[in-house]
Amino acid sequence: MTQVQPPEPAIKLPDTEVLGRSMADIAARSQKLVAEWLKRQAAEGVAMDPLNVGGAFMEMTAKLLASPGQIVQAQMGLWRDYITLWQNTARRIWTDEEPAPVIASDPKDKRFADPAWKQNEIFDFIKQSYLLSARYINDVVTQVDGLEPKTAQKVDFYARQFINALSPSNFALTNPEVLRQTRETGGENLVRGLNNLLNDLENGRGNLRIKMTASEAFKVGENIASTEGKVVFQNGLMQLIQYSPTTEAVYARPVLILPPWINKFYILDLRPKNSLVRYLVAQGHTVFMVSWVNPDEELAGKNFDDYMAEGVFAALDVIQKVTKSAQINAIGYCIGGTLLASTLGYMAATGDERIATATFFVTLTDFTDSGEIGVFIDEEQLAALEDKMLRRGYMEGTEMAATFNMLRANDLIWNFVVNNYLLGKEPFPFDLLYWNSDATRMPPAMHSFYLRNMYQKNLLSEPGGISMKDVPIDLSKVTIPLYFLSCREDHIAPWTSIYKGARNFTAAPRRFVLTASGHIAGVINPPDGGKYNHFIADELPEKPEEWLENAVEIAGSWWPDWQRWATGFAHDKVPARIPGNVRGVKVLEDAPGSYVLMKA
């Protein structure tokens, strides 16, 4: 008689010996981390409310208490929705009915992509309960009367941070995917996740520095930032890279790119298939790239106009010597574009005509509406930041990165919390996220000038509002052709603000282009990718909505449009220029150079 074997247990049991060793190691590392973190916090004198959130919410609370009817009405609506949800869930459990959801999640919301959030009655109830509560909180804080706009914006922003943090997808016991993984691995996913968490805390020296990609998969100069070229100049603030030609003839007018120094330049030269640098070289341009230094306390006194003198003008001097061209096409990205705009104002005032055309990638020159980044720009926060920068001698790059991550918290924070810490997985190799994690520092003098004069006071948009090297800047005096690229879903530089800034260049011929996607993906959009349409219109009416209504939609990348625009002003060609082939200009090292390798 054949003996029936009992079925295999559905739940894998953990190896107690391995689990014990892991937990002992975790405990020891945790104790050391906490001790070091507390010691450092005491030494740095960290404020209890560094983001100045408390005052905004106290003001909101006072306004709410002054009109309690609004809260009562919102609570009654929430209670009615909860009763309906309870009834619908009971019907699903006891019958075969599937009533329409009381509240549906956005189909694009990746947090609830697992089928169990819809198919399982309990998880569907948890999800809808969360969405109802989130809607209630959002309705209450966004409909408070009498709040100043800046306070209302801060309350709205941090309320959404709170809502995002409380998502049931962020907790092991209420995330069906995590529960399934825990059951299948006997809890090994949670142990691995705890180790991942400790590794991130150790890498951040007690501050959580979430690992977003498999950083070991990338090496700058090998599989990213690999376009061939030479460093032909350097000073204390930047290296200048000249890229090697791939065509026998090149356009006589060279291209200078001024990337942001908040991040590193190789966002424009990631892998060969999405490298704007490689594309421009292939189109026959002589391309020069500024690679900014990763500053330390020795450069604490460098100001915004030092970046003009030692960055833009130093590069122009070398390019003129290398190419013998009297004029160049200049491109500025983000803060690099703001520097370029300020420099153009200076050049217009001083009669310097070395820049023939200028292109601005997602660049704010009018900061009236700077988007949600404005939440971090108030007097209390600026004063605290300036104090911290002066004591250190620089702005820590990871702090700036954390600020930008908060603008897209679900994608850039909580997504990795679930993947790395709850599921216990390693992040995938992704070049864009590797670049995003390669943070840079900033000099206190420059950063304070930029935040106060641009973001806080919006002085660049006013004639004579700021001065560069003691010369008042007036953007309306700039007369050269300008190209403005904006992105429809940009969370850092809203396209409507870029549009408003473009209209301040009243004396210049301007081309405004709006592409799909965000601050990075909309810019890094190669033609072969077949992604993201763009919009173009010749006129710039007062309202951006009117411009969009009259704009022509064009499929695919905007890169060919820029190529036609830039070469339309000067299409003469000369023999290809080989880096180091000019007397008096010495090749210092191969691209991408050594400055880009400096870590924060």
Image (cartoon, rainbow, N blue to C red):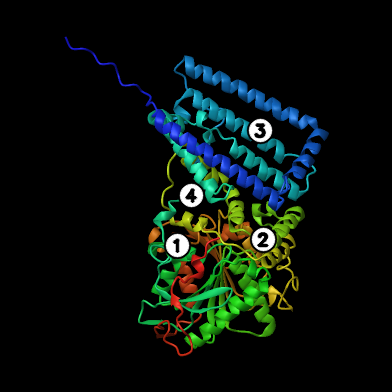
Give residue 176's position: percent from left, percent from top. Answer: 46, 30
Asked if residue 587 is positioned above or below residue 431 in the image, the reply reads below
Give the Cα distance between marks 3 and 4: 32 Å
Q: How many marks?
A: 4
Residue 325 visible in the shown view: no
Q: Of circles 1 and 3, which is in front?
A: 3
Q: Secondary structure at mark 3?
A: helix
Give the answer, above or below, for where 50 lies relative to 555: above
Q: Nearer the viewer, residue 74 or 437?
A: 437
Residue situated in front as seen by the camera: 334 or 177: 177
- What residue does disc 3 label? 136
**Quarter that holds the C terminus:** bottom right
- Identify the residue position indicated by label 4 in the image: 212
Q: Report if residue 540 is visible in the image.
A: yes
| Among numbered discs 2 and 1, the one appearing first in the sequence | 2
Q: Which mark is nearer the camera, 2 or 3?
A: 2
Please report contact status of discs 2 and 4: CB closer than 8 Å, yes or no: no
- Give how far apart the Cα atoms at labels 4 and 1 are: 27 Å
Extreme residue in the left direction: 1
Disc 2/disc 4 C-alpha distance (Å): 27 Å
Q: Residues within 10 Å of mark 3 (few under 14, many from 20)?
A: some
Among the two numbered marks 1 and 3 on one chain, the one whose residue lies closer to the N terminus? 3
Indicate the secondary structure of the residue bearing disc 1: loop
Q: Earlier in the sequence, mark 4 or mark 1?
A: 4
How far apart are the two marked residues, 1 and 3, measured between alpha carbons? Answer: 40 Å
Disc number placed over residue 392 in the picture, else none: 2
* Label 4 Cα crowd, 10 Å radius (few <14 / some 14-19 / many 20+): many
The local secondary structure at tag 2 comes to helix
Of the image marks 2 and 3, the number of the one nearer the N terminus: 3
Q: How many C-alpha atoms fall within 10 Å of the one at disc 1: few (<14), some, or many (≥20)? A: many
Q: Amino acid at mark 3?
A: Tyr
